[in-house]
Image (cartoon, coloured by chain):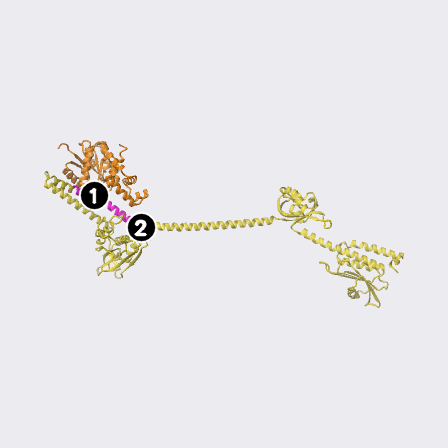
C-alpha cells in the first residue's frame, strides 16, 4: 500500500493535513530560539505527530556554536532506558543516512524500527526516529520527517546568520570609529553610537534630516560634493584627511575618512555609501604635543648648545684676554723697569746737558776771550788775562763738580748694604732681563759657586748692574749663531767674590773697549752711553770692580768683583 | 771808534755774562749785560742801536717772552737767542717770532761773532729779506725727500718717527739727513734749522 493510497482514507488525510499545518507554524515560533530549543521543539513535534516511540536529534558543532543532542521518548519507554537508547541510536545510525534499519530493543521484547533523516546544514546533523510499530515508517512519516528536517535546516541557518549579524552590529556599535551607511543620494541610513556622538546627532531621525555632505565642515563641503563623492561613486573609495563638523558645538574636527561604496554582490550595482572614519583630534594633539616636545627639545638643545658655545667663546676670549693681559702686564712691568731706568737716565742726561752747558759756555767764552786778548796784544792787560783764565779754570772745575754730583746722585739711592744671596739676586735680574727677549732664543746658564753664596751689597743697585750686563749680553747676541749666556759666581780669595757675565755675541772693538766705562760712549743706536758708566760707579761704591775682557771664543766677558759677605 | 757796536747780553748765569763780556770786548764789541730780563726790559726802550743776545732758559721769564716784550718796546733791535743743545723747538719758535738767529750753547766764538755781525748789519728784523732769499735758494736745491726730512727734523721729530711716517728705514733717514746738510752747506744741524725757518718765512714776508 502506497502512502498516497493511505491518504485516500479521509481520516488519514485529515490527520496528515493537520500535522503539516502544525509543522508549518513551527518556524515562526523558532524565530528567537537557539539551536537546542529548535532541536527540542522539532523532537517534541515529531513525537506527537508521528507514530514513533523515540526521537533523537543531533546537531554537530557549527562555527562557534556547541554541538546539540536532544532525545525525546514516549511514555512507554521508561526514562531510565532513554539514555541507553540514545547511546544505542547514536552508535547505530552512524554512517547510515536516509535509510531504515532495525535494532533489538534493549528494554523489551521485540524490534525497534529506525528512520534516519539528514538535516541539511552539513556535518552529521540528523533526525533519528524509532518506533516499535512494524509499519514504521510509513510514507506520511517520511514526508513529515523530511519537512521537519528542512524547517530545522532553515531555522538553524537563520539562527547562525542572525548571530553573525548580531556580532557585527555589536562590533560596529561598540567601535570608537565613526561608522555610517547612507543611500546613494547621501541620506543617512545608519550611524553607530560613536558616529552620533562625534558629530553631535542624537538619533537616526535627526540624522536623516541632513545629507551626509552636511557632516563635513562648511569649507570642505564643496570639495566633498564636487570632488570626493563623485570619486567614491566612480572608483569605489576615497581615503584621506578631512574636517567634519559637530552639529551642536560647531567644532571642526579632523577625521581620517574611509569613504566607500557598497555594491550588491550579485548584480554588482552600487547600493550604498558607507564610511569608517577616525577622529584625529587625539592623534593630532599627540602629534602636536610630540612636535612641540621635539621643538622645545630641539630649542633647548639649540639654546643649550649656543649657551655652551657662548660659554666656550667667553672662556676662549677670557683666556686670550688673560694671556694678552698677562703679556701686557709682563711687557708693562718690563717697560716700567726699563723706562724708569731710561727716564732716570734721560732726566739725568737732560739735567746734565743744561747744568753742563752753562759752565762749558762760560769756559769756552773765557778761553776764547783770553785767546783773542792775547792775539789783540796791544791793549792786553795781564791781570785781565789772568782773571779770564782763572774764570775758565773755575768753570771747568764747576763742570767737573756737576758730573761728580750727578754720579753721587745715581749711586746714592738706597744705601743699605747687607749680606744678600747671590743666586737669588742673579736669578731675579736674569729673569727680568730675559723677559721679553724670548724671540732671541738665548740659552741662559747660571752657575753658582757654593763658596760664593753671599755678598755684601745693596741688592737693588747690584741687581740693576746685573740687569744691565745681562740685558747687554742678550742684545749683543741678537744676531749671533751661538746664543748662550753664562752667569757664573766664583770665590776669588778670602775677601772677594766674582760674578762673570759671559756672552757669545759680537764682542767689542778695541777702540770701543778702551772707553767702555766712560759716560756717553755707546755702540747702541738708541743708547745714551750711561749704562756701564753708572754700573762701574755703583760697583766701585761697593768697594768692588767692574771690568771687561774679550771672550777668547768670541763675545764679551764682564767681571764684577764684590767684597765677600761671609766675613762681615 | 767810528761806530760803536753794542751787544746787550741777558743771561742769569754770572759766569756766562762775565765771560761773554770779555769775549765780545776782545772781539771789538761793547758788551752790556743784564742779570735779569726785567732789568733789561726796563731800559730797553732808550738803548742805542745794537743787538740783543738772549738766553732762553732763565728763571722768572724765558728768552722767548723777553723777545715778544721787546717787539713792542724796541722792534728794530735784532735778537739772537741762545738755546740749549738740541733744543730745536725753542730755536724754531724764536726764529718765527722774529729772532734774526739762534745759537746753541756752548758755541764757538767764531759762530757767535758771525751771528752778531750779521745781526748788526741787518739791523732790524724786517731786513732779513736777504737772508730769507738766500735760505729759500738753498732749500730749493733739496730733493722732495730731503725737504720732507728737514721739515720733520725742524718739527722736532726723532729719526725713528720720521722713518715710520715716511715709510722708510732709519738708515735711509740718516742718509737723507746727511745729504740735506751737505746741500745746504752746513756742518751743524742748528744751521739747517735756521735756514729752514728762514725759508719758511719767505711767504709771510
The quadrant of the picture occupied by the C terminus of chain B is top left
- Left/right placement of residue A501 relative to residue A240 reads left
Q: Residues within 10 Å of mark 1 (few under 14, many from 20)?
A: many
Is the residue A162 above or below the residue A187 in the image? below
Residue range of the region highlighted in magenta in the rendering: A339-366
Subunit under mark 2: A
Count how many numbered circles sit on residues in the image: 2
The quadrant of the picture occupied by the N terminus of chain B is top left
Instruction: Look at the image and give the colour of chain A.
Output: yellow
Which residue is under mark 1? Answer: A357
- Left/right placement of residue A261 relative to residue A23 reads left
Q: Position of residue B124 (x, y in %)?
A: 21, 32
Residue drawn at the location 12% of the way across and 40% of the way down:
A375
The answer to whether residue A564 of the structure is visible from this angle is: no
Residue A364 shown in magenta: yes
Q: Splitting the image into 4 quarters, where does residue B99 fall?
A: top left
Which one is earlier in the sequence, the residue at label 2 or at label 1?
2
Residue drawn at the location 83% of the way across and 58% of the way down:
A143
Chain in orange on the image: B
The span from disc 2 to disc 1 (Cα, nearest Å) is 33 Å
Looking at the magenta stretch, what is its main secondary structure? Answer: helix
Q: Residues within 10 Å of mark 2 (few under 14, many from 20)?
A: some
Residue drawn at the location 30% of the way across and 49% of the way down:
A336
Amino acid at each position: 500500500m502506497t502512502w498516497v493510497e493511505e491518504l485516500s482514507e479521509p481520516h488519514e488525510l485529515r490527520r496528515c493535513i493537520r500535522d503539516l499545518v502544525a509543522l508549518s507554524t513551527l518556524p515562526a515560533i523558532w524565530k528567537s530560539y537557539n539551536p537546542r530549543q529548535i532541536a527540542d521543539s522539532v523532537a517534541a513535534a515529531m513525537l506527537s505527530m508521528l507514530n514513533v516511540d523515540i526521537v533523537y536529534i543531533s546537531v554537530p558543532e557549527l562555527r562557534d556554536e556547541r554541538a546539540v543532542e536532544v532525545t525525546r521518548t514516549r511514555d512507554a519507554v521508561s526514562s531510565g532506558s532513554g539514555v541507553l537508547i540514545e547511546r544505542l541510536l547514536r552508535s547505530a545510525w552512524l554512517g547510515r543516512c536516509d535509510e531504515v534499519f532495525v535494532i533489538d530493543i534493549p528494554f523489551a521484547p521485540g524490534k525497534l524500527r529506525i528512520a534516519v533523516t539528514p538535516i541539511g546544514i552539513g556535518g552529521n546533523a540528523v533526525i533519528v526516529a524509532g518506533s516499535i510499530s512494524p509499519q514504521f515508517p510509513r510514507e506520511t512519516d517520511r514526508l513529515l520527517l523530511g519537512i521537519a528536517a528542512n524547517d530545522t535546516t532553515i531555522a538553524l541557518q537563520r539562527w547562525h546568520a542572525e548571530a553573525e549579524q548580531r556580532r557585527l552590529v555589536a562590533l560596529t556599535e561598540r567601535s570608537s570609529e565613526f561608522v555610517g551607511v547612507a543611500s546613494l543620494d547621501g541620506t543617512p541610513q545608519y550611524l553607530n553610537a560613536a558616529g552620533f556622538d562625534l558629530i553631535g546627532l542624537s538619533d537616526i531621525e535627526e540624522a536623516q534630516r541632513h545629507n551626509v555632505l552636511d557632516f563635513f565642515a562648511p569649507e570642505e563641503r564643496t570639495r566633498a560634493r564636487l570632488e570626493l563623492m563623485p570619486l567614491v561613486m566612480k572608483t569605489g573609495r576615497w581615503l584621506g584627511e578631512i574636517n567634519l563638523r559637530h552639529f551642536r558645538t560647531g567644532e571642526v574636527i579632523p577625521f581620517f575618512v574611509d569613504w566607500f561604496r557598497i555594491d550588491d554582490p550579485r548584480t554588482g550595482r552600487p547600493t550604498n555609501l558607507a564610511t569608517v572614519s577616525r577622529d584625529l583630534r587625539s592623534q593630532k594633539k599627540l602629534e602636536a604635543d610630540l612636535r612641540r616636545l621635539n621643538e622645545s627639545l630641539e630649542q633647548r638643545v639649540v639654546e643649550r648648545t649656543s649657551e655652551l658655545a657662548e660659554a666656550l667663546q667667553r672662556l676662549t676670549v677670557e683666556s686670550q684676554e688673560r694671556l694678552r693681559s698677562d703679556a701686557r702686564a709682563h711687557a708693562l712691568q718690563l717697560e716700567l723697569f726699563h723706562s724708569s731706568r731710561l727716564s732716570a737716565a734721560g732726566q739725568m742726561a737732560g739735567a746734565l746737558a743744561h747744568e753742563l752747558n752753562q759752565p762749558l759756555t762760560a769756559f769756552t767764552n773765557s778761553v776764547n776771550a783770553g785767546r783773542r786778548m792775547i792775539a789783540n796784544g796791544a791793549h792786553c792787560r795781564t791781570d785781565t788775562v789772568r782773571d779770564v783764565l782763572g774764570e775758565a779754570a773755575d768753570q771747568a772745575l764747576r763742570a767737573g763738580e756737576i758730573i761728580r754730583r750727578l754720579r753721587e746722585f745715581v749711586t746714592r739711592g738706597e744705601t743699605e748694604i747687607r749680606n744678600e744671596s747671590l743666586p737669588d739676586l742673579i736669578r731675579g735680574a736674569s729673569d727680568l732681563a730675559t723677559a721679553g727677549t724670548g724671540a732671541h732664543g738665548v740659552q741662559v746658564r747660571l752657575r753658582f759657586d757654593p763658596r760664593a753664596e753671599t755678598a755684601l751689597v745693596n741688592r737693588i743697585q747690584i741687581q740693576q748692574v746685573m740687569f744691565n750686563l745681562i740685558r747687554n749680553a742678550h742684545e749683543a747676541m741678537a744676531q749671533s749663531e751661538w746664543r748662550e749666556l753664562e752667569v757664573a759666581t766664583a770665590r776669588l780669595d778670602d775677601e772677594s767674590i766674582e760674578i762673570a757675565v759671559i756672552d757669545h755675541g759680537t764682542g767689542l772693538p778695541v777702540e770701543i773697549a778702551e772707553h767702555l766705562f766712560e759716560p756717553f760712549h755707546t755702540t747702541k743706536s738708541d743708547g745714551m752711553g750711561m749704562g756701564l758708566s753708572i754700573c762701574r760707579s755703583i760697583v766701585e761704591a761697593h768697594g768692588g770692580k767692574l771690568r771687561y775682557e774679550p771672550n777668547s771664543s768670541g763675545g764679551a766677558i764682564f767681571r764684577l768683583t764684590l767684597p765677600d759677605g761671609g766675613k762681615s | 771808534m767810528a761806530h760803536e757796536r753794542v751787544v746787550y747780553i741777558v743771561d742769569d748765569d754770572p759766569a756766562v755774562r762775565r765771560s761773554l763780556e770779555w769775549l765780545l770786548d776782545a772781539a771789538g764789541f761793547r758788551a752790556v749785560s743784564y742779570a735779569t730780563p726785567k732789568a733789561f726790559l726796563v731800559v730797553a726802550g732808550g738803548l742805542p742801536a745794537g743787538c740783543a743776545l738772549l738766553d732762553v732758559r732763565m728763571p722768572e721769564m724765558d728768552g722767548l717772552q723777553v723777545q715778544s716784550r721787546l717787539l713792542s718796546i724796541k722792534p728794530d733791535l735784532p735778537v739772537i737767542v741762545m738755546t740749549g743743545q738740541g733744543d730745536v723747538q725753542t730755536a724754531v719758535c724764536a726764529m718765527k717770532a722774529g729772532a734774526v738767529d739762534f745759537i746753541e750753547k756752548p758755541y764757538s766764538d767764531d759762530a757767535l761773532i758771525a751771528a752778531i755781525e750779521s745781526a748788526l748789519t741787518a739791523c732790524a728784523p724786517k731786513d732779513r729779506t736777504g737772508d730769507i732769499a738766500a735760505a729759500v735758494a738753498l732749500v730749493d736745491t733739496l730733493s722732495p725727500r730731503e725737504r720732507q726730512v728737514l721739515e720733520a727734523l725742524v718739527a722736532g721729530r726723532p729719526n725713528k718717527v720720521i722713518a715710520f711716517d715716511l715709510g722708510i728705514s732709519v738708515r735711509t733717514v740718516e742718509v737723507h739727513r746727511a745729504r740735506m746738510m751737505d746741500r745746504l752747506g752746513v756742518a751743524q744741524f742748528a744751521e739747517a734749522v735756521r735756514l729752514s725757518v728762514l725759508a719758511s718765512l719767505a711767504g709771510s714776508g
